[in-house]
Amino acid sequence: MAASEEEPPAEPQLRDTPDDICLEAAANAIALHPARELLAAGDVDGDVYLYSYCCVQGENRQLWSSGHHLKSCRDVAFSRDGQRLLTVAKDKAVHVLAVEDGRLETRIAKAHGAALNCVLPVDQHLLATGDDNGELKVWDLRKGGAVLEARQHEEYISAMAVDGAGKILLTASGDGTMGVFNIKRRRFELLSEPQSGDLTSVVLLKRGKKVACGSSEGTIYLFNWNGFGATSDRFSLRAESVDCMVPITESIVCTGSLDGVIRAVNILPNRVLGCVGQHLGEPIEQLAVAPGGQLLASCAHDQKVKFWDISSLGSMVVDEYRKKKKRGGPLKALSSKAAGSGEDFFADLREEQEATAEAATGSDSDDSD
């Protein structure tokens, strides 16, 4: 009688975050779809993958893969409408893939004279690419060619950002400068003063009034909009580096570092809020935020894409006045998967919140906007 009574299947387990996605090779780049639960990844072998993800355990799925790049894929980005995936690689090619089936729609072979490093959709028809020699190109897919070409940087372009109007494009470079380009007028505007270390990332904050650049030396440099020549503030995280950075709110960014730690950082007033997650001992390559700002995805040298619950960050309020912290404590855990209680792992991060105030110079934190 017992044999005929089969147990009902177990209920699918709902989690705070999707399962890790394990890749065959380390991912250089990831991107999250602007509207759907889709993740794209480009790896060191030149392969590009599209996955669906969800918070039900065991329900992540690989939808397709593309092996059109001949060398390492350096960056991936979804188009604004989410119908296409843009990819660039060390093979100097730009690919435009259909999101639905991975079909190669457009290939720009030898798009640059050097290996490509980053790609950014500007609007429905324009995209920008940056290479290892510091050259920027803006492409019009309707015309099939570049409408702006400029080599103002002396080193690689690491990241790009564009304002909400699609008019001003900002570039971060390994030469320590931020570049400013006017896309509408198809011209170069200016370079900022060089900063210490490579600039690795660039994001807009405070409703477009501030620009933040991460650096290889662990400092975030701040610029006022229309004051791009010189920094208005700088903030040392006491991290080994800031290798990637994404905005979560108008004031909070998440940063990835060589030490494998993902930090949440408030900008103006400048605070390290705590640890969102980590790839233990593995340098973080890239971060991406899901639509709605509840989930963060990260990829690192451990060949995994991990997801982190960042829903608490949107409601955090940072006081202008710093309370005295007890010295020697670990970095505060901001998600259930953050190793906030790992004493040994966070030994080198102790005293971080106190030290950030001392390391910051010329703070203009009274400018709350």
Image (cartoon, rainbow, N blue to C red):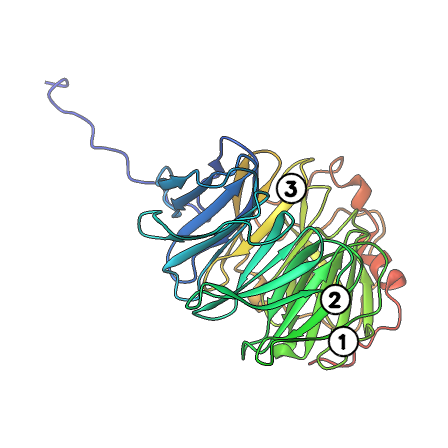
Residue type, numbered disc 2:
Met
Label disc, if present, on residue 178 of the rendered structure: 2
Residue type, numbered disc 1:
Phe
Indicate the secondary structure of the residue bearing disc 1.
loop
The answer to whether 315 appears left or right of 281 in the picture is left
Residue type, numbered disc 3:
Ala
Indicate the secondary structure of the residue bearing disc 3.
loop
Residue at image x 68%, y 45%? 261
Disc 2 versus disc 3: nearer the observer: 2
Q: Nearer the viewer, residue 2 or 259?
A: 259
Residue at image x 10%, y 21%? 4
Residue annotated with mark 3: 339
Q: Upstream in the sequence, badge 3 or badge 1?
A: 1
Q: Which x, y percent locates residue 18?
A: 44, 45
Q: Are marks 1 and 2 in contact (CB under 8 Å)?
A: yes
Residue annotated with mark 1: 228
Instruction: Give the CA distance from mark 1 to mark 2.
Output: 8 Å
Q: Nearer the viewer, residue 294 or 201?
A: 201
Residue at image x 61%, y 50%? 116
Q: Quadrant of residue 135?
A: bottom right
Quadrant holding the C terminus: bottom right
Instruction: Give the CA distance from mark 3 to mark 1.
Output: 37 Å
The answer to whether 346 appears left or right of 71 in the picture is right
Q: Which x, y percent locates residue 270?
A: 76, 67
